[in-house]
Image (cartoon, rainbow, N blue to C red):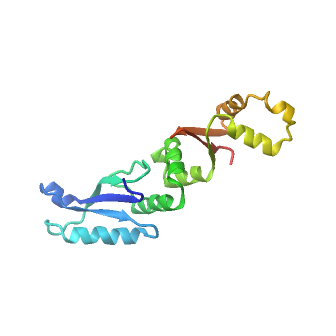
Amino acid sequence: MTDSLRVYVACLAAYNGGRLHGDWMEIEPGDDATDVQDRIDAMLARSPEPGAEEWAIHDWESPVAFGIGEYESLDDLVAYAALLEDFDHDVLRAAAELWSHGEGVDALRALVDRYRGSFESAGEYAEEVFGEIHDIPQALVSYIDWPALERDMELSGDISTVHSGGRLYVFDNLS
């Protein structure tokens, strides 16, 4: 598994002619859509089919399941690569479980921006949040059912959570 985003871009003229021609391309941090298009154009220029113009993404590798489609926009590919560079992959994987590909890459970035932390058990987030905003007497803390309070926060739509890798990832829905 790679730590970056790689896509296999195939020449459709060759594919339709019964031949496989394409390249694995790493989408680098700092690339823009023009950089990626230039690499695609170079691959098409080497096609065994003269005048090849059309291409599609036939495979992809990434540490996060972005659900990249055959005709993903190059701007979105570059944005996914930037997310991999900018954010912890465990957080991105958790956010991707809540995100719908149809919402677009900007919605995924917004979701990651609302990340509030990962915790070993349910209730830790609620205890942390309420401890910061309320002065709860220490004698009462052990009587509070933090997991139930956190579950209520999720049921009311204040937060969304994902269980992954033995951790609970919390995303704020109120931001």
Residue 13 or residue 36, whichever sits in front: 36
Q: Quadrant of residue 8?
A: bottom left
Q: Residue at (16%, 55%) from the top-left corner?
A: 16
Does residue 31 lie above or below 115 as drawn?
Answer: below
Residue 129 image offset from top left, x and y in percent: 74, 43
Q: Quadrant of residue 155?
A: top right
Instruction: Judge left or right: residue 11 versus residue 93.
Output: left
Q: Residue at (84%, 41%) from the top-left corner?
A: 134
Residue 67 or residue 64, whichever sits in front: 64
Instruction: Judge left or right: residue 74 versus residue 172.
Output: left
Q: Residue at (51%, 40%) from the top-left corner?
A: 164
Does residue 119 lie above or below 44 as drawn?
Answer: above
Residue 2 or residue 20, whichever sits in front: 2
Does residue 38 lie above or below 124 as drawn?
Answer: below
Residue 173 image offset from top left, x and y in percent: 65, 43
Instruction: Judge left or right: residue 148 versus residue 77.
Output: right
Q: Residue at (47%, 61%) from the top-left corner?
A: 79
Instruction: Judge left or right: residue 17 versus residue 151.
Output: left
